[in-house]
Image: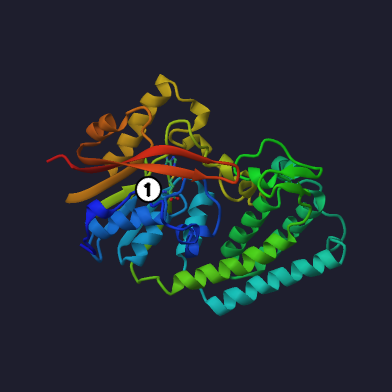
Amino acid sequence: MLARDDESALDLSFREVRERHRTKHVHRLHPYLGKFIPQLVEHFLRRNFRLGDWLLDPFAGSGTALVEANVLGLNAVGVELSAWNALIARVKLGRYDLPLLESEVRDAVAQLEGFVRGARRWPGGGAPSSSGPYLDLWLAPEARAEVLFFRTLIPRYVHGDVLRVILSRATRSARQVAHYDLARPQRPVREPYYCLKHRRICAPITSALKFLRRYALDTVRRLREFAALHTPAEAVILCADARTVGYDGWQFDGVFTSPPYVGLIDYHDQHRYAYELFPDQPDQAAGEIGSPRHGTGRAARETYVGDVATVLRRAPLRPAAHVFVVANDAHGLYPEIARRAGLELVATMHRPVLMRTERDNAQYRESVFHLRKRQ
Ligand SMILES: C[S@@+](CC[C@H](N)C(=O)[O-])C[C@H]1O[C@@H](n2cnc3c(N)ncnc32)[C@H](O)[C@@H]1O
């Protein structure tokens, strides 16, 4: 085991961990609703795995488990359906020529500054008239011109995917939403408004430039920080449906994963701006397990049980593998999922979760199911 310490002294809420550690290095490269707190992953990986083990996360999301596995010297494979999420995870785990990355990022920002200084005149004449319904609705015309211009620069650079992540993050921040409502805004804000977060009148955002400047340097700094922790362990991200993906002869010493929950989050819709910015990213929303598009009724729950059980049953596990599944099991579905997946329950731990958004601090309870292969 990588570590052992006094379990009784540990509080799985990680309440005492400060925001800056919860979002350390690459864990804040791009917003993602419903990601792990890295300290939770680290806690279980340290206690249950050895250097060089192979870990699987079949619902890899933005790659939190893979990042933490890598820092601990564990090889890891992640499967993720959403192309944009898989791209975020790959960018977090990439190895970069850091001086080149920094010069590319600075060059792109300098080009954008020139575009803004030149009154956002599109090179060679007319700007694109539409960027897609979401960006047309949520961005001011100036901000939209800036993000579209920045997008045209990306193919020039070696580290284009890093620039895509920077651009997507900046686009999200540049939307005309109230500062206190970034996570789930209802309608664009076009006039000055009373801001519940800052307790004063705030003006709607009209430009993306300051976000692109800020996130460009922040991203380089975070990737540099992670590069110092990166181990030579392998990290592979497969953009695929975990119900049908091929595992190519891999054998895993364990699983650490958090499946989508029934009807809670639409993992494509939360990054609508990214899918519009980068239409080459295929939209696989129809394959999402537990999608709110199917509701939370009895039929949706039954399909969910079958789907998650299929994913877990298909994981090629060594006999002694540990399987950890983190779930907000409001409907009590996991005992049946485990049974259908051929797993038995070793322990169930519970942890309170604080959902911090700009507007409120909602609390709910999450379970960590520790499972083993049924012998
Ligand atoms: C709770 S999130 C995982 C978040 C992850 N633990 C993190 O820290 O970023 C669940 C993920 O499962 C993905 N997903 C949903 N259906 C899937 C499927 N059929 N195959 C693979 N991934 C799927 C969603 O796109 C989402 O990113």
Mark 1 CB near ligand 1 (8 Å cut): no
In which image quadrant can residue 348 be found? top left
Answer yes or no: is residue 129 visible.
yes
Apparent side of residue 348 relative to residue 296 in the rendered image (left or right): left
Query: Which residue is at the front of the view, 198 or 57?
Result: 198
Answer yes or no: is residue 317 visible.
no
| Quarter placement of the C terminus | top left
Residue sitting at the far top: 298
Q: Quadrant of ligand 1?
A: top left
Residue sitting at the far front: 199
Residue found at x 77% / y 43%? 193
> Whole-percent x and y of residue 43?
31, 56
- Indicate the amino acid at tag 1: Ser
Residue sitting at the far left: 375
What secondary structure is marked by label 1?
loop
> Whole-percent x and y of residue 237?
41, 56
Residue found at x 36% / y 33%? 329
Q: Mark 1 — residue?
A: 13
| Quarter placement of the N terminus | bottom left
Apparent side of residue 5 relative to residue 357 in the rendered image (left or right): left
> Whole-percent x and y of residue 32?
52, 49
Apparent side of residue 253 relative to residue 60 in the rendered image (left or right): left
Label 1 Cα crowd, 10 Å radius (few <14 / some 14-19 / many 20+)? some
